[in-house]
Image (spheres, rainbow, N blue to C red):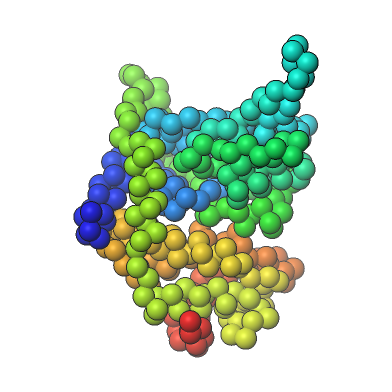
Amino acid sequence: MNGLESAEWFRKTWTNLRAEIGKVVVGQEEVVEGVLVALAANGHVLLEGMPGLGKTLLIRTLAQAVDLDYSRIQFTPDMMPADVTGTNVFTQSGGFEFRRGPIFANFVLADEINRATPKTQSSLLEAMQERQVSIGGTPHALTEPFMVMATQNPVEQEGTYPLPEAQLDRFFFKLIVPNPSKAVLAEVVNRTTQGEMAQVSKVASAEDLIQARRITREVSVSPEVLDYALSMIVASHPDSEKPSDIAKKYVRYGASPRGAQSIISAGKVYAMLEGRFNVSKENIQKAAKPVLRHRLILNYESEADGVTADQVVDGIVDAVNAGDKDPIRV
């Protein structure tokens, strides 16, 4: 397939996936789109929202739409790393045998991940980055495609352990799941209390997902658009040579190089969803919040002034758009 044919195939496949998910998941269009963008970019997703907003339903429905393995891990304070990755057990034959944990699935829902202790949270790090787990010094590869979608309640709730920065950086996107409107809530109630539940059909395969990821990597990024994206990353650092004013005031640490990789990868997927094989500045702008909101480490002044990460990202984008930050030439 040439570029235009690839873009059209990608757009059709992802439109079918989105429509199939929409049979079950009501509303949450931005969240559904964000999850599908991360899926095409071979990334993981962190969802933040209150319980009961359909986060578990979303990933289960996605797994059904591509007919792949799905597992759910309910994180609790007493959970151990072996409960996630698996462990070696002594058998009657006198040897050790590896028993796989729930991490060995194509789609893994890490439900309420911030309820677990940091030691257990860290058990996901190798799996998310290296696509393998090591038990007793022996690596065990995970099956591709592999995606972790973790949920967390807002950190101000009691009994939670905020994710460390190193683990947050492994998530491609952080998506905020809002409370449904009255109209959406009415549709949810009608669908779940009347008649039969909608059935999800397979509309894509593992091979389609791998092919989509391969096509996405081939999308072109012009030097101008790359400069634009890198300018946002550099402007997020308060101690860089070209910081934005809002970063100097409210940010302790800016986005990592993984943030730069993610914003470009997301821009490529957004371009494909629009039927184009080249990334625009608007695609980069659309990716800025989900890519950067969890990678910015804010200072105490931001908390005192009630400034959120999204507001800081908006300020960084505005500063770059205004032209007061010279692009970083590559």
Residue 282 at x, y = what percent?
A: 37, 69
x and y, in percent, of residue 78 in the image: 78, 31
Can residue 230 be seen at all in this image of the molecule? yes
Q: How many marks?
A: 0
Q: Image quarter for residue 193?
A: top left
x, y (%) of residue 222?
36, 75
| Residue located at (39% from left, 45% from top) | 210
The quarter of the rendered structure image containing the N terminus is bottom left
Q: Is residue 158 visible?
A: no
The answer to whether residue 247 is left or right of residue 273 is right
**Residue at 67% across, 65% down:** 297
- Residue at image coords 73%, 32%: 82
Answer with the quarter of the image where residue 49 lies: top right
Q: Report the front residue among 242 and 28.
A: 242
Choose top left, top right, bottom left or bottom right for residue 137. Answer: top right
Residue at the limit of the structure toward the top, as seen here: 92
Looking at the image, which residue is at 25% across and 49% down? Answer: 9
Looking at the image, residue 8 lies above or below residue 106: below
Residue 20 % position (x, y)? 32, 36
- As rendered, which of 53 and 224 lies closer to the eye? 224
Q: Is residue 26 above or below residue 234?
A: above
Q: Nearer the viewer, residue 243 or 100?
A: 100
Establish if 117 lies above or below 257: above
